[in-house]
Image (cartoon, rainbow, N blue to C red):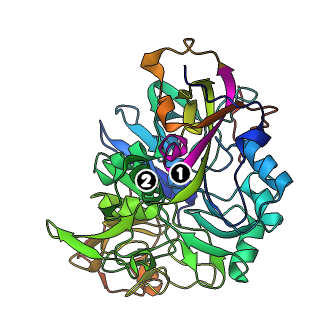
Amino acid sequence: MALDKNGIAKRISHELKDGFYVNLGIGIPTLIANYVPKNINVEFQSENGILGMGPFPFRGSEDPDIINAGKQTITSLPGASFFDSAMSFSMIRGKHIDLTVLGAMEVSEKGDISNWKIPGKLVKGMGGAMDLVSSADNIIVAMMHVNRKRESKLLKKCTLPITGLRCVKKIVTELAVIDIVNKEFVLKELAPGVSVNEVISVTEGKLNIPDFVPTMKI
Amino acid sequence: MINKKVSSVNNALEGITDGMTLMLGGFGLCGIPENSILELVRIGVKNLVCISNNAGIDDFGLGLLLKNRQIDTMIASYVGENAEFERQMLSGELKVILTPQGTIAEKCRAAQSGIPAFYTPAGYGTEVAEGKEIKVFDDKNYILEEAFKADFSIVKAWKGDTIGNLIFKGTARNFNPMMCGAGNVTIAEVENLVPVGELDPNMIHIPGIFVDRIFQGRNFEKRIEQLTVRER
């Protein structure tokens, strides 16, 4: 069975390692904070200016001056710090962040990503995404495998305006974990109950299938 | 003692006229200069170029200036939460220069610091890089971005003193510090304006040299864009 959004987040949480500083994008990536393995310590950075981001506040104790990049009210954990936007992007462009997880509208087999604009239809803006993808060495995309029209989001070439070139290393969707190796998609894991053919049928870009593809451990 | 204190928002905004370029602090609705924005609506200056990370929401923040058609050009990184903004942009009524968030921050800091331009990797290979110089450092591509030029910087701080020293709170800091001194004239509105000597010099985020006018803001609404809570 295909995963839901929480399942995708849970699978990506296995990529967290002890001591990681992590930036989570808006949407599915935000959910990853709920599944940090108990035996490791990580710190979450939000590009609007906090390191050491904590969970949502208890009702009634929300502070309008403490929000995340999705403009949601949050809390700060012991050891947290606040800083300005220039310093925040010094952390990001300066490669001090160990893992970046963000959503995407399209990813190409070369690792190009599009996630900020649909010409003539929808313009949200890139926010910090272009800064993040231009510098991070470790980028995971969390997204659904197809768009609302059931068209593949894993393409030979992105059709929407680009956010960054050759930057995505791993994609986790409701169906599979796919790595990008030498400008090709490689099927690494299948969601429980999902078949290889099912993944092939919704992947437009070239997909390499190893002899053995394990099932995701969630 | 140099005195930057002005008695009202109206005095603080003196000199802002049609067609000027303004930098305004804030991320979403967090840390925006609420008093100054309401005063800009009241005085009705038009054809503004506004530099701010976001454009407010339909009925608060810069969204109020948009609704009033006071903004000609908006330079921002993310505009997803404002339907009127999207409508004006897609119809061509509003000119929008979408700019990566880190690049906006650095263009402010460059202006503040006397750096005319800088190279950044953000936006290489995208629409953002069109028409800009590309340079390779250590096999990686960078684009040349220029410092902002603005007539006024308008920021919001938590505490300030009459000589213009500023302290910010939480994530309301965001773009406010690097906008100070980046425009020709910097206006700071603060939640608590205190006499000189009350702020600990070790805790100052922005020294008063970067601020020209400071005033005590009133009735801060601090609207929350996305209220998210957990139950006890």
Badges 1 and 2, same chain: yes
Residue B105, label in figure: none
> Which residue is situated farthest in the front direction here?
B1
Residue at the (57%, 47%) spot, across then down: B185
| Element type where label 1 sits in the image | strand
Corner quadrant of residue B74: bottom right
Q: Is B125 left or right of A55, judged from the image as shown? A: left
Instruction: Give the vertical position of B105 relative to A214 (above or below).
Output: above
Question: Residue A5, position in %: x, y?
Answer: 56, 58
Q: Chain of mark 1?
A: B
Instruction: Give the vertical position of B84 relative to B115 (above or below).
Output: below
Residue at the (53%, 27%) spot, across then down: B165
Residue at the (60%, 56%) spot, across then down: B52
Question: Residue B194, position in %: x, y?
Answer: 65, 18
Instruction: Give the vertical position of B30 relative to A182 (above or below).
Output: above
| Element type where label 2 sits in the image | helix
User: Disc 2 marks which amino acid?
Assistant: Ala
Instruction: Give the vertical position of A121 relative to B59 (above or below).
Output: below
Mark closer to the chain start, 1 or 2: 2
**Magenta residue span:** B174-193
Q: Residues within 10 Å of mark 1 (few under 14, many from 20)?
A: many
**Does the residue at mark 1 contact the one at mark 2 (Cβ under 8 Å)?**
yes
Query: Which of these two is toward me, B192 or B142?
Result: B192
Q: Is B77 left or right of B138, judged from the image as shown? A: right
Where is mark 2, residue-wise?
B111
Q: Would residue A178 be seen by someone viewing this image from the given angle?
A: no
Corner quadrant of residue B198: top right
Where is mark 1, residue-wise?
B183
